[in-house]
Image: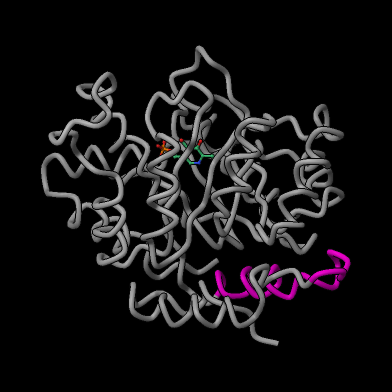
């Protein structure tokens, strides 16, 4: 059976809206029919991976730093009529530019995205909402209430500037299991943000998540060509391993307009989540152009 909707939303909001209706008709879980075991419920896992190989790499725009800019001035005046820029307006422009989804991270310290942003994103976006979160009871309750299409579980440390490393799924397996079960019971697809490590991928498979997001930060920040080559090799190997395990393979962190050329060499990718580089570029060329430029650099993927 052909799965719903993010296969058809390359053309932007209008196609996405009809896709979303199809997704709803399919049942909110869409990808995981109730009662079905993960192995048989994941036509979408296979589909998404296959779709990635057909040449269209999907872009999820991470809009956290739109909120960072607003909070820099208005954190103490959340109801100000002047509070800007608005992450929801930014998300709409991303969709108009052709992005396939919107990603936002509700952190425990609420340093950028706020609960109200997530609610408004849920109500307004036409493509799909990927809710990034640390695995804590408070944020899990928020995710269940907001009902994003997808959750990406990430490690979160209060003092970090941004997510520093991948989740240690092996060490936190038991906690993750409960969270993943609750998310699945609410029709939410789950991704684990992990380092390129086959043991972590095997753990993700055992946890019956639909997707993994491979941490590309080490590749992006490699100081030497040797480290870059090693990291690229690891990412390629792990992408193959995850694909063979029927996981949808996404990637993210530190991807920019230059190193995207390296990302093209990683096989079996379905989606990239990119934030900081697009926000930075937008200062010079405008937000919509920045999204379009990244989409252009993602074309002709031969995963
Ligand atoms: N994916 C994950 C899991 C992240 O935590 C982040 C950063 O919030 C991103 C992707 C986007 O990273 P960047 O802002 O470096 O593009």
* Quarter of the C terminus within the rendering: bottom right
Main secondary structure type of the part rendered in magenta: helix
Q: Nearer the viewer, residue 5 or 233?
A: 5
Question: Residue 279, relative to residue 77: is it above or below?
Answer: below
Residue for point 46% across, 57% down: 264
Q: Which of 129 and 198 is in front in this view?
A: 129
Q: Quadrant of residue 64?
A: top left
Residue extent of the magenta highlight: 34-53
Residue at the top extreme, as displayed: 159
Residue 38 magenta-drawn? yes
Residue for point 41% across, 64% down: 100
Residue 169 x/y as whole percent: 77, 35
* Quarter of the N terminus within the rendering: bottom right
Residue for point 24% across, 59% down: 93
Q: Which of 278 and 82 is in front in this view?
A: 82
Q: Nearer the viewer, residue 250 or 257?
A: 250
Residue 84 x/y as whole percent: 18, 37
- Left or right: where 183 falls relative to 82: right
Q: Quadrant of residue 240?
A: bottom right
Residue 51 magenta-drawn? yes
Q: In which quarter of the image is residue 37?
A: bottom right
Residue at the bottom extreme, as displayed: 1
- Left or right: where 291 falls relative to 236: left
Residue 135 x/y as whole percent: 68, 32
Residue for point 39% across, 74% down: 10
- Left or right: where 299 falls relative to 143: left
């Amino acid at each position: 059976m052909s799965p719903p909707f993010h296969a058809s939303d390359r053309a932007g909001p209008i196609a996405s809206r009809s896709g979303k209706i199809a997704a709803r008709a399919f049942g909110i879980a869409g990808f995981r029919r109730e009662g079905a075991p993960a192995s048989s419920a994941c036509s979408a896992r296979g589909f998404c991976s296959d779709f990635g190989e057909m040449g269209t790499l999907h872009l999820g725009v991470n809009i956290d730093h739109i909120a960072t800019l607003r909070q820099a001035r208005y954190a103490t005046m959340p109801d100000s009529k002047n509070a800007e820029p608005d992450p929801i307006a930014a998300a709409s422009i991303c969709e108009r530019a052709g992005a396939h989804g919107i990603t936002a991270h509700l952190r425990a310290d609420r340093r950028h995205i706020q609960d109200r942003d997530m609610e408004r994103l849920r109500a307004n976006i036409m493509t799909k909402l990927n809710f990034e979160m640390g695995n804590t009871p408070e944020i899990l309750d928020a995710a269940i209430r907001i009902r994003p299409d997808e959750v990406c579980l990430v490690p979160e440390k209060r003092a970090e500037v941004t997510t520093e490393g991948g989740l240690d799924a092996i060490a936190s397996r038991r906690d993750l299991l409960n969270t993943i079960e609750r998310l699945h019971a609410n029709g939410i697809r789950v991704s684990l943000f992990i380092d390129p490590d086959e043991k972590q991928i095997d753990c993700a498979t055992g946890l019956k998540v639909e997707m993994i997001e491979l941490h590309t930060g080490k590749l992006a920040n490699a100081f030497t060509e040797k480290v870059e080559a090693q990291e690229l090799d690891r990412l390629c190997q792990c992408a193959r391993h995850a694909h063979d395990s029927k996981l949808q393979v996404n990637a993210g962190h530190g991807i920019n307009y230059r190193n995207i050329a390296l990302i093209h060499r990683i096989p079996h990718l379905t989606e990239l989540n990119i934030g900081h580089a697009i926000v930075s570029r937008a200062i010079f060329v405008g937000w919509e152009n920045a999204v379009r430029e990244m989409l252009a650099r993602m074309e002709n993927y031969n995963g």
